């Protein structure tokens, strides 16, 4: 092999090393998503269970494929290089199918599930400390109050106060204080939560397009290296 081919061989090895780390990260994210989903409401489980399992499977398969690529490149095994190219093409198809499924779910749900989940936590605001911490962080960060508006707190029979401190604007010295009804944030958090979901969808677009580009580079390198090995064997 000439120096160019040797460079390509080790480039494929490095590519697959990074690819295996990405596969591990995807697998872990899928497991965490599945575990957290099991602790959520039935609406969330019904919507995202298939997606979580798909992510776990994709991450595991990605790691196995990367092994074929790494081992094949180092051992100069043409069969494993070809297997790697075929597998990465398959995972490319599966990945695109999962992406299309996610987009369909995102359009159908349109933020409904995430709002329902938030509403479930919001209704327990005065009962559980962890619910207060979560809702307060949302209301402070997004400068909103309630799900649809401040009046949501008036409908709570177990409310100990009219409005929580997190509905109030930031005062001097970076401190939050109690405020009058006229000073509280008048917008609910519903629209902000939906915006976050949609922003997450846009971020996923960028990640998917980046991964597709990297995967195609891997396929092209594998084809070139396999063809070179075949010519050297003649």
Image (tube, rainbow, N blue to C red):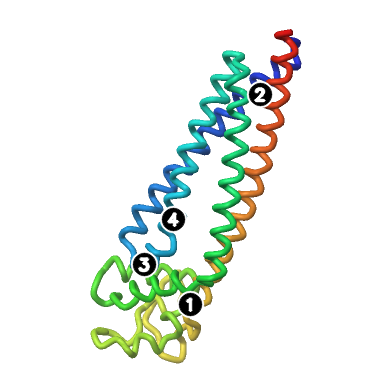
Give whichever of discs 4 and 2 has the lower sequence position. 2
Residue visible at 56% across and 23% down?
A: 70
The quadrant of the picture occupied by the C terminus is top right
Residue matched to label 2: 11
- Residue sitting at x 73%, y 20%: 227
Q: Which numbered disc flags the more N-terminal residue, 4 or 1?
A: 4
3 or 1: tag closer to the N-terminus:
3
Q: Is mark 3 in CB contact (under 8 Å) with mark 1?
A: no
Q: Mark 4 sits on what residue?
A: 50
In the image, is residue 68 above or below residue 158?
A: above
Q: Which circle, 3 or 2, is nearer the viewer?
A: 2
Which quarter of the figure has residue 216?
top right
Which of label 3 and label 1 is nearer to you? 1
The front one of 153 and 12 is 12
Q: Quadrant of residue 126?
A: bottom left
**Residue picked out by circle 3:** 134
Q: Which residue is mark 1?
A: 190
């Amino acid at each position: 092999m000439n120096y160019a081919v040797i460079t390509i061989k080790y480039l494929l090895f490095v590519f697959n090393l990074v690819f295996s780390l990405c596969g591990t990260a995807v697998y872990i994210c899928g497991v965490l998503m599945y575990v957290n989903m099991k602790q959520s409401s039935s609406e969330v489980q019904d919507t995202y269970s298939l997606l979580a399992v798909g992510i776990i499977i994709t991450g595991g398969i990605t790691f196995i494929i990367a092994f074929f690529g790494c081992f094949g490149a180092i051992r100069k095994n043409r069969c494993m290089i070809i297997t790697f190219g075929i597998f990465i093409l398959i995972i490319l198809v599966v990945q695109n199918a999962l992406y299309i499924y996610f987009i369909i779910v995102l359009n159908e749900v349109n933020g409904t599930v995430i709002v329902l989940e938030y509403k479930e936590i919001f209704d327990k605001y005065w009962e559980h400390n962890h619910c207060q911490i979560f809702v307060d962080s949302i209301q402070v960060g997004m400068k909103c109050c309630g799900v649809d508006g401040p009046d949501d707190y008036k409908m709570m029979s177990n409310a100990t106060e009219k409005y929580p401190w997190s509905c109030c604007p930031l005062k001097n010295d970076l401190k939050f204080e109690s405020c009058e009804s006229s000073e509280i944030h008048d917008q609910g958090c519903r629209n902000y939560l939906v915006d976050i979901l949609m922003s997450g969808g846009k971020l996923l677009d960028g990640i998917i397009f980046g991964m597709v580009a990297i995967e195609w580079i891997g396929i092209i390198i594998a084809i070139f290296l396999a063809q070179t090995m075949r010519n050297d064997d003649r």
